[in-house]
Image (cartoon, helix red, strand yellow):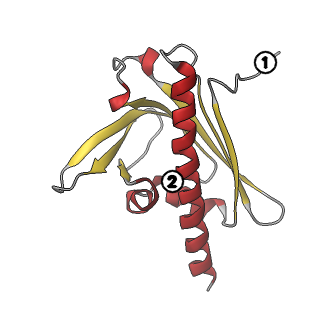
Amino acid sequence: MNKPLDPETNVLRTLLVDAPPEVIWKALTDPDITRLYTSTDISLGLKAGQPVQWFSREEDKTRKLVAKGNVLALVPNVRLRYTNYVVSGGLPDEPGSHTTVDLHLVPEADGRTRVELWEGDFAGLPQAIKRAREAGKVWVESLVGLKRESEERARLQAA
């Protein structure tokens, strides 16, 4: 029997988006779109088993590494799962300091897509509850931006 996830040390979010999975997938994986709602660029060419990186764009036009990980699973239009290490998190860059992010895109009968997000488990990290809460806040902002960008792109495609 699976042990339930502790909501204090795991981030669980669900969002309904009025867009098909293909549009949301593009918004999740295209650096030109991710930058619009996260202010970071995701690395190009995501592949299972390969590294993934996120860069901020600085005022002087340079790029600064803000997070990195490895793609664990990639099923276009369905699932993106990766490890996540936040560079500014104050932890050593070692596997025990990484969390896992799992995003699922689930088509709904009414034409919308349910975006299911899990990030965890923060339990083994110092200040685990605080880190999970901070990550949860960041995810709320990112998911709202993902919804906005995806729905706008879906409306433009339908027009």
Residue depicted at x 77% and y 66%: 111
Please tell me in which quadrant of the rendered image residue 1 appears.
Answer: top right
Instruction: Name the residue located 78 percent from the left edge and 18 percent from the top edge.
Output: 2
Q: Is residue 127 above or below residue 49?
A: above
Question: Which of 25/129 is in front?
Answer: 129
Q: Name the residue under label 2.
A: 28
The residue that mark 1 highlights is: 2
Task: Pick whichever, 26 or 115, lies toward us.
Answer: 115
Q: Which residue type carries mark 2? A: Leu
Q: Which of 66 and 107 is in front in this view?
A: 66
Quick check: 120 above or below 37?
Answer: above
SS at badge 1: loop
In the rendering, at what x and y percent does residue 40 appear? 37, 51
Query: Quarter holding the C terminus?
Result: bottom right
- Between the residue at mark 2 and the residue at mark 1, the CA separation in whole angstroms equals 29 Å
Q: Residue 68: x percent and y percent?
A: 37, 34
